């Protein structure tokens, strides 16, 4: 079976939220993300008030997941990724929290470049003060299980405020067959 990359928030979510934040986990992560290049240094959203505070909380949660992956800290990872987490990769394969952590920390997947393609509708959206939906578009190159790949993807991540904080509950990356033209 031709295996496409199984990619978690370490690839897609961190660049989504770390844009314009020089001290974010994205800029400190050495592995499994080998290098990361972003195309924009502007925040994806500029809300005000309570929504901005909630978005900052989500940002912190995403940074903590990145740190957990970098440091291979399973307890920290489990704090921010729901036990019921589900991921659908661009090949349609479905994985869970345990499989994702293993792939992201074992070196099975490495990423040479992750470039955010800033689009006006990509942002962190907060709903009912306890749910966040994050959308983004990326150009990605890397290696998955010894096979090099280059692809464009759209991603959708769902975070829920539960168990005392923000937790990632679902993530989907979809391959983009035709490049987006502005």
Image: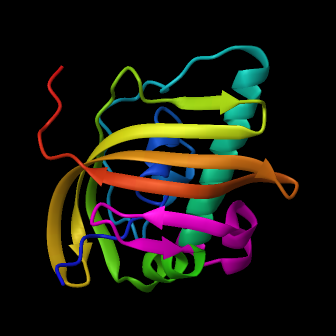
Residue name at image x 77 percent, y 30 percent = 128
Q: Please indicate whether residue 24 sits to the left or right of residue 105 in the image.
A: right
Q: Position of residue 127 (x, y in %)?
A: 69, 30
Between residues 136 and 131, which one lies in front from this camera angle?
A: 131
Residue name at image x 33 percent, y 66 percent = 34
Check residue 144 for magenta coloring. Answer: no
Residue name at image x 74 percent, y 32 percent = 54
**Quadrant position of residue 35:** bottom left
Q: Position of residue 151 (x, y in %)?
A: 18, 55
**Quadrant position of residue 84:** bottom right
- State the residue lying farthest toward the top: 48
Question: Colour scheme used in the picture?
Answer: rainbow
| Chain part drawn in magenta | 70-96
Between residues 71 and 128, which one lies in front from this camera angle?
A: 128
Q: Position of residue 75 (x, y in %)?
A: 74, 77
Vertical position of residue 9 compared to residue 143: above or below: above
Instruction: Check the picture and name the quadrant holding the C terminus.
Output: top left
**Quadrant position of residue 94:** bottom left
Q: How many marks?
A: 0
Q: Please indicate whether residue 106 sits to the left or right of residue 126 in the image.
A: left
Vertical position of residue 168 compared to residue 39: above or below: below
Check residue 89 for magenta coloring. Answer: yes
Instruction: Check the picture and name the quadrant holding the N terminus.
Output: bottom left
Vertical position of residue 178 compared to residue 90: above or below: above
Vertical position of residue 95 compared to residue 175: above or below: below
Q: Position of residue 61 (x, y in %)?
A: 68, 51
Between residues 159 and 104, which one lies in front from this camera angle?
A: 159
- State the residue lying farthest toward the right: 164
Residue name at image x 42 percent, y 52 percent = 12
């Amino acid at each position: 079976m031709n295996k496409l990359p199984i990619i978690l928030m370490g690839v897609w979510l961190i660049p989504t939220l770390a844009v314009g934040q020089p001290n974010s986990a994205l800029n400190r992560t050495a592995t499994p993300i080998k290098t990361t290049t972003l195309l924009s240094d502007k925040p994806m959203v500029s809300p005000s008030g309570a929504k901005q505070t909630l978005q900052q909380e989500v940002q912190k949660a995403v940074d903590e997941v990145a740190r957990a992956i970098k440091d291979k800290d399973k307890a920290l990872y489990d704090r921010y990724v729901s036990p019921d987490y589900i991921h659908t990769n661009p090949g349609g394969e479905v994985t869970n929290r345990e499989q994702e952590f293993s792939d992201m920390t074992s070196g099975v997947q490495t990423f040479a470049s992750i470039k955010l393609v800033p689009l006006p509708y990509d942002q962190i959206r907060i709903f009912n003060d306890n749910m966040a939906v994050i959308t983004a578009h990326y150009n990605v190159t890397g290696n998955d299980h010894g096979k090099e790949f280059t692809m464009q993807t759209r991603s959708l991540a769902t975070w829920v405020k539960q168990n005392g904080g923000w937790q990632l509950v679902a993530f989907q990356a979809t391959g983009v067959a035709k490049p987006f033209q502005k």
